Image (tube, grey):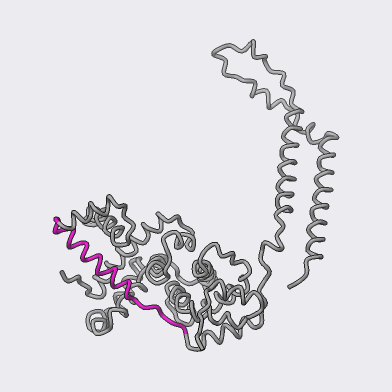
Amino acid sequence: MTHIELTDTEIINKVLHGEQALYAQLVERYQQYVFTLALRFTDNREDAEEISQDVFVKAYRSLADFRGDAKFSTWLFTIVRTSCITFLRKKRLDTTSIDNERTLIQLENRESGFNANIVEQKSRHAMINAAIRMLSPDDAQVITLFYKGEQSLGEIGRIMGYDPNTVKVKLHRARHRLKEKLEKYFSYAHEY
Amino acid sequence: MRMNTEQPMEDRLWNYIDGHSTPAEKSAIEELLATNREWQEKYSELLDVHRLLDASELDGPSLRFTRNVMEEIARFHVAPATGTYINKNIIRGIGAFFLTMIGGLTVFILAQFKWSGQSSDNIGVGDTDLGLSKLKNVDVSKAFNGTYITLFMLIAVIMGFVLLDIYLQRKKTTPNP
């Protein structure tokens, strides 16, 4: 028996016509994206999982409002962003950029143990993820949406509420800051 | 300072790497990359970061995540689309009502003014007083005591009740999902 994979729109139509169980396919398909984006905001796996679950429940309840004029992922990531902001407001977490001096000192102390030795033993994936976590939530999100979320500049703009040119500038700056973090905290050096 | 001089080069190279350069810009950069060592080094450096980001992996939630979500949504129904319960005609009606009220009041208040300043024939070339100083002599209380304003207020209240009635009627007749 051949298994035909349904598109997002097909699944949504079926769910709207009562096949609730099919929603699990959408959850499976997007849970990593949603979780990673939430993790960029909270830096805490439990909180990120709570936000992600809330996002999928909200998306399910508002599914009839998805008009299909954008990708389902773009619509879903918009919910992720608003949910993260609401969650942070509720929890009154420190949302200031990690670039401030105090946090950098804390990070320096926290990272110093594994800065040169352990990180070098870790994979490049772990290094890049750790470096992204050092960025501000906005920088980390724009990078994640562009590289992992399969979103264009226009779609990222729609999610974050910026125009595409602003997104482009933000992306350039975020990568620049990421490169600085890689060089400063992970002894990352480009080999010519 | 280093960043200020490098930034345009970096921006142009990022655009090139992302495929956002115009064809003219693309060939200009390709020419620079073929001849200029500084550009070659920067390009190689940025390309390395780009590849690193491209190869980065997504994090995943716990294994029970999908089941947790499905258990949670089992308690809910999909809410009806916003468009089905927000009637645009009501919104437009409310907008039109307020605009009419504002317009009506403005016209009414202006009609109460006695524009008895100098006639335009008597105003000299250097005379900058356009009669605005006489506005302070306008009796505003008269404007808010007249029969017309009472009439306007009455119409406003009746229209408000009519709109509220229409809204509640629609809400009552819309079947619950």
Is residue B124 left or right of B44 when viewed as pictured?
Answer: right
Say whether residue B90 is magenta.
no
State which quadrant residue B14 falls in.
bottom left
Residues in magenta, as a range: B35-61
Residue found 26% across the figure and 58% down from its top? B13
Q: Nearer the viewer, residue A58 or A105?
A: A58
Q: Quadrant of the C terminus of chain A?
A: bottom left
Is residue A9 left or right of A177 when viewed as pictured?
Answer: right
Q: Nearer the viewer, residue A50 or B23?
A: B23
Residue B108 image position (x, y, % from top left): 76, 32
Q: Nearer the viewer, residue A8 or A98?
A: A8
Residue A179 image position (x, y, % from top left): 27, 67
Residue found 55% across the figure and 62% down from its top? A69
Assign the magenta stretch its main secondary structure: helix
Say whether residue B52 is magenta.
yes
Residue found 60% across the figure and 83% down from its top? A21
- Is B84 rendered above or below residue B150? below
Residue found 51% across the figure and 77% down from its top? A52
Is residue B32 left or right of B83 when viewed as pictured?
Answer: left
Residue B120 image position (x, y, % from top left): 64, 14
- Is B128 rendered above or below residue A53? above
Is residue B21 left or right of A4 when viewed as pictured?
Answer: left
State which quadrant residue A141 falls in.
bottom left
Q: Nearer the viewer, residue A112 or B172?
A: B172
